[in-house]
Image (tube, grey):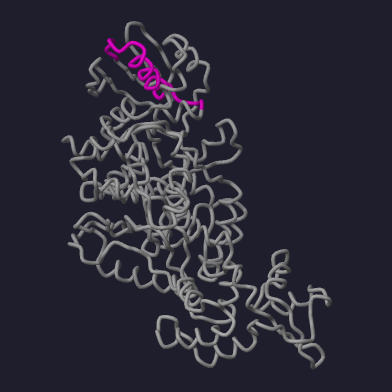
C-alpha cells in the first residue's frame, strides 16, 4: 500500500467520525462488516423474530425497533475512545481535504451548524466545552461486537453505541432480520448525526435507537422534534447506498445517478405533508404559545359546547388519545364536564370552522395566495398571523440540505446481495468482488478479518490511535500492566481470526493473547520509548520481546512476526 491507501485502510480499523467524513466509502464498509457478523444473524432465531417470519418487512421493523430499544443504550460519552488534538488530525488529513473545509463540516473543528446550534451552544451541548485548546475526543464508530461488549463496561448493563454505530446497526439488521433489500436503505450523515432512510411505505427514518414513520415525523411531540434537528438544521455531508456514495465536498460521486434522484424525491415526499386539522393540531401541540388562540367545539345533545385548546392539550398529555385524529372522541370522554362552557369563547378561533376552511380550500402553504388566505382567517385573533403561517409552513414542509446532484458520477461496483442469501453466501460473494470493490475490501478490515487482510493497517491503528490503553495504564509499570493483562479474561470480543484493538481490550477488560500483546506494546512505547518491540505470534503462543519477554496465550490460530521500532516504524512478516 502507498501512504494514502494505508491511511484509508487503517481508518477502516478505527472508524472515527472524522475518518468516515474523509473516506466516505467506510460507512458502507461498516454496514457490510455488521452484515458479515454472526451476531445479527443470530437475532433471526430469536422467538420475537421467528414468530414474524411470515409477516412483511414493516411489521418486522417495528419489532426490531423495540428490540434495539430494549437491548441497546445510546452512548455519547466523548471519552469512551480517548482524546486526540485538532492539529494532529488536520495534519493527518490535509492531503485529502483542506483544514478550512474540515472546520466548516465537523463539530470538533469549529463547526457550529445552523441557527439552532448557535442557540444551544453546540460545544456545550455535546460536552466539548470542557476541553481546552485543541484537545478533542475521538468520536469512534463501533462494530456490532464492540457495541455488544459495552455490557462489560462499568456502568453499563446493556449494549451501546453512538449515532453512527446505531445507524450502521439498523441498516444491517433491517437487511438481515427484516429482509429489507439494500437498495431500499440510504444512510444519511450530517456533521453531528447519522441516520437511515428506509424506502418502505411512506418512508421510515431511523434515529439513534428509534424509528420514525412519516406519521410520527409530523406528530408535534418533543421526541420527534429532537429527531428532526439534523435534517432541519444541518447540511447533509454524505449519502451512502449499496451503489456508492455522494459527498458534500467531493466533486466525484459513485452512487448511481438515477438512484440518487429517486432518493431525493422519496425523502422530499417524506418531509412534506398536506395541511389538515390533524396536522394543524400537531403543530399546536409543539408550539404551545399559540394554543391560547384556539378553542374546540363539541356537540352535546344537540347543543354546542366549547373548551380552551390548551386545556384539551393538557388532557391529551396524560392520555392515549389525541386531538383531531381517529381517537379524538375518546379523548373528549375523558374531559371533565366542568371544563366545557356553553358559550363560544371570545378571541379564539373555532377548530371546527377552521377544519371546514382547510377541507374546502385544500390549503397549500407553498402557494403564496393560499398563505395569504389563511393569514386573513387567522388575522382577526392572532397578532402576527404572518409569522404563525410561516412557522406552520416550515412545520409541514422541511427542505433537507443535501449534496447537490451536479456531481461527476463515476460508476462503481454495486454491492448486490439479497436477504434470501445465507451469511456464508454473502461473505463468499464479498470475498470474490474485493479486487473490484474498495468498499467490499474495506469491509473485511472493518470486520477485522486478520486471516485475509494485510496486517499493516491494523498495526498502524493499534500503535498510533489507541489512547485509552495508555490512559488506563498510566499509573502502572510495564510489569504491572503485564500482570493486569494476564489476570484479565482471555476471551476476544471477536470470533474466529478477528482481532480487537488495544482500546477495545482496555475498555471491555477482556482479550485474546494477541490483543493483549498489542496493548502491552503501547504501554512499553509510552514507558520505555527507547525499546524496539517484537511480537511473535505462533499459533497458541504469543511472545512480546522488549527488554524482557512477555508471554500470552491465543485461541486465534494466527502466525505473524510484528516489529515496531523505537522510532515508531513497523513491519509485519510471516512466522
Give whichever of 144, 464 is nearer the camera: 464
Q: Quadrant of residue 304?
A: bottom right
Q: Quadrant of residue 563?
A: top left
Residue 103 point in image, percent of width and height: 29, 46
Query: Does any portion of residue 48 appear in the rendered image?
Result: yes
Tell me the residue at 22%/57% (across/down): 412
The C terminus lies in quadrant: top left
Query: Would you say 287 lies left or right of 331 here?
Result: left
Q: Is residue 177 above or below residue 15?
A: below
Q: Is residue 29 above or below residue 482?
A: below
Q: Is residue 527 above or below residue 464?
A: above
SS assignment for the magenta stretch, majority:
helix
Residue 236 point in image, percent of width and height: 34, 58
Query: Would you say 314 lies left or right of 99 here?
Result: right
Q: Is residue 146 magenta?
A: no
State the residue lying farthest toward the top.
548
Q: How many marks?
A: 0
State the residue lying farthest toward the front.
383
Tell me the residue at 32%/6% (across/down): 547
Query: Does any portion of residue 240 appear in the rendered image?
Result: no
Tell me the residue at 26%/33% (across/down): 454
The N terminus lies in quadrant: top left
Specify the segment rendered in magenta: 509-533
Amino acid at each position: 500500500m502507498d501512504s494514502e491507501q494505508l491511511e484509508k485502510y487503517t481508518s477502516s480499523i478505527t472508524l472515527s467520525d472524522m475518518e468516515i467524513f474523509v473516506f466516505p466509502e467506510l460507512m458502507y464498509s461498516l454496514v457490510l462488516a455488521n452484515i458479515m457478523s454472526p451476531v445479527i444473524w443470530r437475532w433471526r432465531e430469536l422467538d420475537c423474530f421467528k414468530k414474524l417470519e411470515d409477516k412483511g418487512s414493516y411489521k418486522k421493523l417495528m419489532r426490531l425497533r423495540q428490540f434495539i430499544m430494549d437491548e441497546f443504550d445510546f452512548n455519547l460519552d466523548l471519552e469512551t475512545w480517548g482524546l486526540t488534538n485538532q492539529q494532529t488530525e488536520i495534519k493527518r488529513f490535509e492531503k485529502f481535504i483542506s483544514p478550512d473545509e474540515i472546520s466548516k463540516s465537523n463539530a470538533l473543528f469549529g463547526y457550529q451548524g445552523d441557527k439552532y446550534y448557535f442557540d444551544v451552544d453546540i460545544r456545550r451541548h455535546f460536552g466539548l466545552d470542557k476541553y481546552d485548546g485543541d484537545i478533542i475526543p475521538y468520536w469512534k464508530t463501533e462494530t456490532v461486537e464492540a457495541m455488544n461488549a459495552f455490557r462489560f463496561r462499568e456502568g453499563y448493563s446493556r449494549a451501546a453505541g453512538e449515532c453512527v454505530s446505531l445507524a450502521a446497526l439498523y441498516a444491517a439488521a433491517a437487511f438481515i432480520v427484516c429482509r429489507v433489500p439494500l437498495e431500499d436503505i440510504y444512510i444519511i450523515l450530517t456533521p453531528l448525526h447519522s441516520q437511515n432512510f428506509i424506502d418502505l411505505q411512506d418512508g421510515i427514518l431511523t434515529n439513534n435507537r428509534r424509528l420514525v414513520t412519516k406519521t410520527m415525523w409530523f406528530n408535534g411531540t418533543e421526541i420527534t422534534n429532537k429527531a428532526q434537528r439534523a435534517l432541519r438544521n444541518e447540511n447533509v455531508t454524505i449519502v451512502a447506498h449499496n451503489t456508492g456514495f455522494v459527498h458534500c465536498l467531493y466533486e466525484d460521486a459513485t452512487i448511481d445517478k438515477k438512484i440518487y434522484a429517486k432518493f431525493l424525491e422519496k425523502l422530499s415526499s417524506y418531509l412534506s405533508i398536506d395541511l389538515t386539522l390533524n396536522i394543524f393540531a400537531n403543530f399546536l401541540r409543539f408550539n404551545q404559545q399559540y394554543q391560547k388562540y384556539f378553542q374546540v367545539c363539541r356537540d352535546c345533545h344537540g347543543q354546542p359546547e366549547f373548551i380552551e385548546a390548551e386545556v384539551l392539550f393538557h388532557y391529551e398529555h396524560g392520555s392515549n388519545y389525541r386531538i383531531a385524529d381517529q381517537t379524538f372522541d375518546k379523548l373528549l370522554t375523558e374531559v371533565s364536564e366542568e371544563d366545557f362552557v356553553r358559550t363560544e369563547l371570545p378571541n379564539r378561533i373555532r377548530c371546527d370552522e377552521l377544519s371546514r376552511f382547510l377541507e374546502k380550500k385544500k390549503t397549500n402553504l407553498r402557494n403564496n395566495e393560499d398563505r395569504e388566505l389563511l393569514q386573513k382567517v387567522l388575522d382577526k385573533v392572532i397578532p402576527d398571523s404572518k409569522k404563525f403561517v410561516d412557522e406552520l409552513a416550515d412545520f409541514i414542509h422541511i427542505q433537507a440540505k443535501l449534496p447537490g446532484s451536479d456531481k461527476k458520477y463515476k460508476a462503481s461496483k454495486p454491492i448486490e446481495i439479497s436477504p434470501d442469501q445465507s451469511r456464508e453466501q454473502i461473505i463468499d460473494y464479498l470475498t470474490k468482488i474485493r479486487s473490484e470493490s474498495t468498499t467490499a475490501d474495506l469491509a473485511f478490515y472493518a470486520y477485522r478479518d486478520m486471516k485475509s487482510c494485510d496486517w499493516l493497517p491494523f498495526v498502524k491503528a493499534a500503535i498510533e490511535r489507541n489512547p485509552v490503553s495508555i490512559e488506563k495504564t498510566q499509573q502502572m509499570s510495564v510489569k504491572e500492566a503485564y500482570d493486569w493483562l494476564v489476570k484479565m479474561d482471555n476471551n476476544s470480543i471477536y470470533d474466529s481470526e478477528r482481532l480487537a484493538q488495544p482500546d477495545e481490550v482496555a475498555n471491555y477488560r477482556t482479550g485474546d493473547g494477541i490483543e493483549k500483546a498489542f496493548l502491552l506494546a503501547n504501554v512499553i512505547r509510552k514507558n520505555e520509548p527507547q525499546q524496539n518491540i517484537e511480537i511473535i505470534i505462533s499459533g497458541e503462543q504469543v511472545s512480546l520481546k522488549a527488554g524482557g519477554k512477555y508471554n500470552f496465550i491465543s485461541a486465534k490460530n494466527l502466525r505473524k512476526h510484528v516489529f515496531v521500532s523505537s522510532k515508531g516504524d513497523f513491519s509485519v512478516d510471516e512466522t
